Image: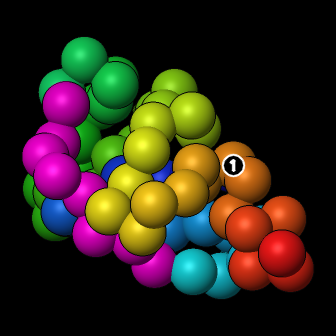
Amino acid sequence: MCTYMLLKWYCDDCGAWYTSDEIKTNDCDEFSETGECEEMDITTEESDANGLCDECTQAREG
């Protein structure tokens, strides 16, 4: 699962942080007061780390 937190991606699968180009509000159902994304559907968005968040584990292993 990937989570939008401010301008960074967080991958639970491998515990990696990726910087994001921009926050796309249509990917986030609700933002908390701290800017965290409460509900998201963004697991296939590309990050600046040149990888897909939902495939970060495989990317690190490779």
In the figure, residue 11 lies in which quadrant? Answer: bottom right
Which residue lies at the image location 65% right of the left edge and 82% below the top edge?
A: 15
Q: Nearer the viewer, residue 11 or 45?
A: 45
Local secondary structure at mark 1: helix
Q: Position of residue 3 (x, y in %)?
A: 48, 54
Residue 31 visible, this angle:
yes
Image quarter in which the C terminus is found: bottom right
Q: Nearer the viewer, residue 53 or 25?
A: 53
Q: Nearer the viewer, residue 19 or 4?
A: 19
Query: Residue tagged by mark 1?
Result: 54
Tell me if residue 27 is in the magenta stretch. no
Q: Position of residue 40 (x, y in %)?
A: 47, 33
Q: Which residues are magenta?
A: 17-24
In the figure, residue 48 lies in which quadrant? Answer: bottom left
Q: Nearer the viewer, residue 32 or 5?
A: 5
Colour basis = rainbow
Residue 5 visible, this angle:
no
* Relative to 27, residue 4 above or below: below
Q: Position of residue 52 (x, y in %)?
A: 58, 49
Rate crowding at label 1 as few (under 14), some (14 to 19) or many (20 or more) other CA atoms within 10 Å.
Answer: many
